Amino acid sequence: MTEHFVAFKTFKLNSSMRILVIEDDQQAAGFLIKGLREEGHIVDHAADGEDGLALAREGVHDVLVVDRMLPKRDGLSVIEALRSEDVSTPVLILSALGEVDDRVTGLRAGGDDYLAKPYAFSELVARVEVLARRTKPEAAQTKLVVGDLELDLLARSCTRAGQDITLQAREFRLLEYLMKHAGQVVTRTMLLENVWDYHFDPQTNVIDVHISRLRSKIDKDFETVLLHTVRGAGYSIREP
């Protein structure tokens, strides 16, 4: 226990990260590095601002944990230099300066979060996790499934109960939009704007025609109906 921590009890994060700790206080850095490594993370350490800036420039870290008061180069100037070079690695600033103005200054310098000392280690871990999660792109959705109906967005194929269903390009796009909103009511306006790119209702029956064709392909020969008309509202694809 040191003056920098009020607790050391923590929890496991979802996945391993590579974290750079820029902290000149050897005791504080030791506790922080030990704790993060026990969580299963790869941790690099720099004891001054110049070394920290050099390591951070490599762009290999998921999160930077930067003390504000550092020898050779202070933490805020490190962050400002990184941002001016378009290094976008998220930064959690650690500082004994915890007043509102101090936090605002840190965030305006390019920090993504600010944690005042003394702090609970579990809170630091949670903040690091949130910063890493924000910067990780969500995996692209390549397959949509509603009941036994499957739409493969990469292969551009459709099956129901293992049977291949041939769809025209517009039918595929229509089904894709409905399945991405499975369980919700999709209005005619939503379909016109997102499937046909119309931004007004041209008083056409194009939607009715395509819904009818789609229904005949994905529902007609199957016991369970998935595509429903919601009277006065629109359409919905859902499991029973």
Image (cartoon, rainbow, N blue to C red):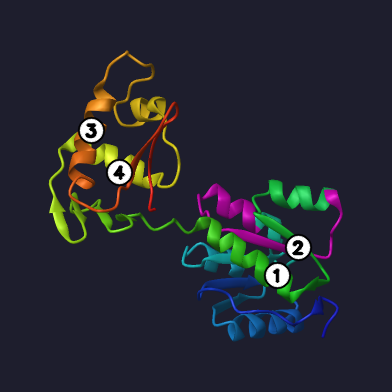
Label 3 crowd (10 A; few <14 / some 14-19 / many >=20): few
Magenta residue check for 81: yes
Of badges 2 and 3, nearer the viewer stands 3
Assess whether mark 2 and mark 4 are in contact (beta carbons under 8 angstroms). no
Q: Position of residue 213 (x, y in %)?
A: 19, 35
Of badges 3 and 4, nearer the viewer stands 3
Relative to 215, is 14 above or below?
A: below
The residue lying at 60 percent from left, 68 percent from top is: 52
Quarter of the image where one finds residue 186: top left
- Marks 3 and 1, Cα distance to the nearest angstrom? 55 Å
Q: Position of residue 57 (x, y in %)?
A: 51, 62
Relative to 232, is 71 above or below?
A: below
Compare residues 157 and 107 and report the one nearer the observer: 157
Identify the residue under disc 2. Answer: 115
Q: Which disc number belongs to residue 212?
A: 3
Q: Secondary structure at mark 1?
A: helix
> Going from the N terminus, do you reach mark 2 or mark 1 first?
2
Compare residues 167 and 65 and report the one nearer the observer: 167
Assess whether mark 1 and mark 3 are in contact (beta carbons under 8 angstroms). no
Relative to 51, is 219 above or below?
A: above
Q: Secondary structure at mark 4?
A: helix
Assess whether mark 1 and mark 2 are in contact (beta carbons under 8 angstroms). yes
> Going from the N terminus, do you reach mark 2 or mark 3 first?
2
Residue 226, visible in the rendered structure: yes
Magenta residue check for 99: yes
> Which segment is the magenta one?
78-100
